[in-house]
Image (cartoon, helix red, strand yellow):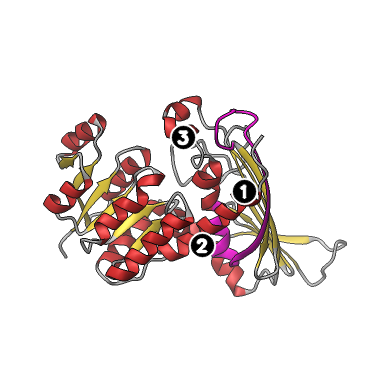
Amino acid sequence: MSRIRLAVIGAGAIGRKHIDVINQVPQAELVAIADPSPQAEALARTLGVAWYAEVEAMLERAKPQGVINATPNTLHVPCAIACIERGIPVLVEKPVAESPERAQELVLAAQKHGVPVLVGHHRRHNALTAAAKALIDSGELGKIVAVSAHWILQKPDDYFDVAWRREPGAGPLLVNLVHDIDLLRYLLGEIEEVQAMTSSATRGFANEDSAVVNLRFACGALGSAVLSDCGVSPWSWEMNSAENVIYAHTPENCYLISGSKGALAIPQMRWWRYGEQSGWHAPLLQETLNVEPIDPFILQLRHFLQVIRGEAEPIIDAADALRSLDVIDLIRQVAPKAA
């Protein structure tokens, strides 16, 4: 089987991650990078692939069979639509857009042209996620009652040397919590109601640096999420799941899920339940689910190749990703102005 010709738009940190993954998957071939920066041009030269300053020129000349769109949030939709209008399947990094209105444009374009869009909520591809969903869907935890999620870590100061990361829409709600919201939706179902507070008191930027959110799921479960990119803690998916080596690994849990018959701590995958007797006087039994680790970006790319070949539907398309973005937008609406 011939390799699928792929191009990457945007050669920042996440774009470089995708490029590294493409080079690890034999069924894929990187043929072009589109990014106007001198650093991207130098990277393309090092990799021996074509470099383009303009997206349209790359699409017309390199003629990729699939494109990974790893641009800043505000460029997700125009770059993706440029691909769709040429009949090229595209993997759009999360969040799918900077606003629900913009995301809807992408949804309509994909429907109009009949071109598949995969959105890069890569945690859906993680083997830990698959194991957790299988356990929840099996009914072993009973009716889900409550969930708590933590995403607290301290981004380095030089992360904010890039100007757009200090502006509204680039705070941890849209950049980070959207991942957790999407994963909670995937595991537990749709979110119907939110309450929230945000703060920018620590960094003092135009966007928030911390937030607390309450959630009501359609299944009846209640949830909470605590979020900060300026606090010291061992509790975040990046640090707990060990899925990305650039983060120091801390063997803790960032999701705690409680049901009427059992509980699950993720990503350490500790499953708690009662034996013959239940209630607070009875001891809880504990089991750790065995999950073989594999880079979810590799699994995501393999899935994208299946989508390009017409062998699979996107595990999360633009319409599904829009529903996660809608929750984030609702949180931003109901939260008092960050202080």
Callout 3: SS: helix
Asked if one can make out residue 316 in the rendered structure from this viewpoint, the answer is: no
Q: Name the residue under label 2.
A: 323
The tag earlier along the polypeptide, 2 or 1, is 1
- Residue beneath label 1, please? 254
Q: Which residue is drawn at 47% across and 52% down?
A: 99
Given this view, does label 1 or label 3 mark the residue nearer the observer? 3
Say which of 9 and 20 sits in front: 9
Task: Work out whether mark 1 precedes mark 3 in sequence or the reverse, and give the earlier one.
Answer: 3
What span is colored magenta in the figure? 180-208
Where residue 228 sits, quadrant-wise, is top right
Q: Percent position (x, y) of residue 4?
A: 20, 59
Whether residue 142 is visible here, answered yes or no, is yes
Image quarter in which the C terminus is found: top right
Classify mark 3: residues with Cα within 10 Å, few (<14), some (14-19) or many (20+): some
Going from N to C along the chain, the mark reached first, 2 or 3, is 3
* Residue position marked by numbered label 3 in the rendering: 165
Can you give x and y, in whole percent of width and height, for residue 39 in the image?
A: 25, 30
Q: How far apart are marks 2 and 3 (CA)?
A: 23 Å
- Residue toward you, 170 or 152: 170
Tell me the CA gap for discs 1 and 3. Answer: 24 Å
Q: Which amino acid does label 1 sit on?
A: Cys
Amino acid at circle 3: Arg
Q: Is residue 197 above or below residue 83?
A: above
